[in-house]
Amino acid sequence: MTARVLIIAGSDSGGGAGIQADIKTVTMLGGHAMTAIAAITAQNTLGVQGVHAVPTEMVLMQIDSVVADIGVDAVKIGMIGSAETAAAVAERLGRPDLAGAAVVFDPVMVSTSGSTLADAATVRAFQALMARAAVTTPNAGELAALGGEEAVLAHGCALLAKGGHGEGDMVVDRLIEPEAGEVARWEAPRIDTPHTHGTGCTLASAIATGLAQGMPLEPAVARARDFVRLALLDAPGLGGGHGPMGQQAVRNDGLFTGPALNQITLPAADYAASVAFYKQLGLTQIVDSPDNGYARFEAANGVTLSIHLSPPASGKGETGATTYLESGALDAWVAYLARRGVRFDQMPKDEDWGWREARLTDPDGNRLCLYQAGEYRRFPPWRI
C-alpha cells in the first residue's frame, strides 16, 4: 500500500520550502502527501514578506478530514503557526486513530533568509510535540533554542542533530537516541551552493516517508540525507537569493530497496569516436577520463551510460557490456540473493570511485553489477 504522509506545516508561496517542498519530496520518494496547512506565508528566495497563521480550528479540521477517510502512516510537522496550534496538534496526535503514526518534528523557527517564523511562546509549546515525536530534527541554532541535546532527549524522542549550519568543509549529522546515545553519524563534503532553501523541510519529510514505508529510523535518515544532497546538486538556480532545491530532478538514483536499472557500460575501441557519437545522440557528457579510456553520459531522465576502452568480448553470449542495478540496501539485497543460491564473482566492496559494488554474470555470461552509489553516479567529484 502506498505510504500515507500527513504534513502539518506552513505554505511557501515561492515553492522552495514548507508544504511545497514536503509534497515534492514525499511524491518523489513514492509516498502520498496530504496536508494540514498551519500558516500561509508570502515569501520568495530573498525573504519572508508576510505570515498569516491559519486558525487552530481549521488546522485540526484538515487533520480530521484526512484521518477519517484516507488514514495516516506518518506525520511530518514543520512551521506550526502559533503556540495554540502546537498544543492542539500535540493533543490531537495522542488520540487512538493516530497512535500508530510515526511523527517527525522539524522545529522551524527561522527561515533560510533569516526571518523569524516562531515566537517564544510557540517555541515553548514545542515540548509537547517533541514528547510525541519519533525524532526531532533541529539545526544548530534551533537545537540551542530548545535547550540543547539533553533537553530534547528528555522528551523521549530521538534527535537528529544536523550540521548544515556549522563551519568547515564537512557536514556532520548525528542521530542520538535517549538511552543509547549516538547511534549513527554521517559525514559528507559541504555542497557549495546558495540554493539551500527548504533543506530542513525536505530532510524531515523524506525521513517521514521512509518511516511510513516501514523503514527503521537509521536507514530512513540515511536515505533522506542522500535525497537532500541530490536535490541540492540538482537545484535549478531560480531567484536572486537562497533558491529552491531540485527535488523534482532526483530520479533513478537507487534510493529504494528494490533495484533501479540506471547505468550501463559499453565497450569502446575508439574513445574519441565513441564520445562524439553519444554526444551527437543528445546525451550529456558528465565524466571525461581519456587516460583511463572512460566516459560517462547522462540522459534526460537521469539514467547514465558509460563507455570504456576494452578488448573484444568472448565467451557464451557475452557482449562486453555491463548492466548496473542500484539498490539503497545493497548488502541486504546481495545477502538475500546469496542465501537463495545466486553465485557472485565479487561480494559487495567499496571501490576507489565511490561506488559499492557486487559483481556476477547471468546464465548466458552477461555481466551484471549490483551497486550503491548515492550522489556519485551523476555527481562524482570529477564531474565535468
Image: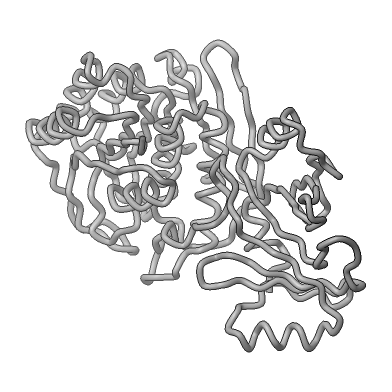
Q: Is residue 163 left or right of residue 61?
A: right
Looking at the image, is 307 positioned above or below residue 344? below
Side of 26 relative to 70 (left or right):
right
Q: Quadrant of residue 294?
A: bottom right
Indicate the quadrant where residue 206 lies: top left
Residue 111 lies, with reference to residue 381, above or below; the image says: above
Q: Which residue does the image show at 35% across and 17% down from the upper left?
A: 131
**Residue found farthest to the top:** 179
Q: Tell me if residue 252 can be seen.
A: yes
Residue drawn at point x = 46 percent, y = 62 percent: 249
At which x and y percent is residue 13? 23, 59
The residue that appears at 61% across and 71% down in the rendered structure is 298
Image coordinates for residue 113, horizontal then vertical, percent: 36, 55
In the rendered view, would you say 165 is above or below 194?
Answer: above
Rendered-image quadrant of the N terminus: top left
Q: Nearer the viewer, residue 66 or 278?
A: 278
Q: How far from the left and from the top, in percent, is residue 117? A: 27, 43
Name the spot of residue 212 as percent of width and height, x first: 39, 31
Q: Nearer the viewer, residue 364 or 348?
A: 364
In this view of the protein, can residue 169 be seen by the observer?
A: no
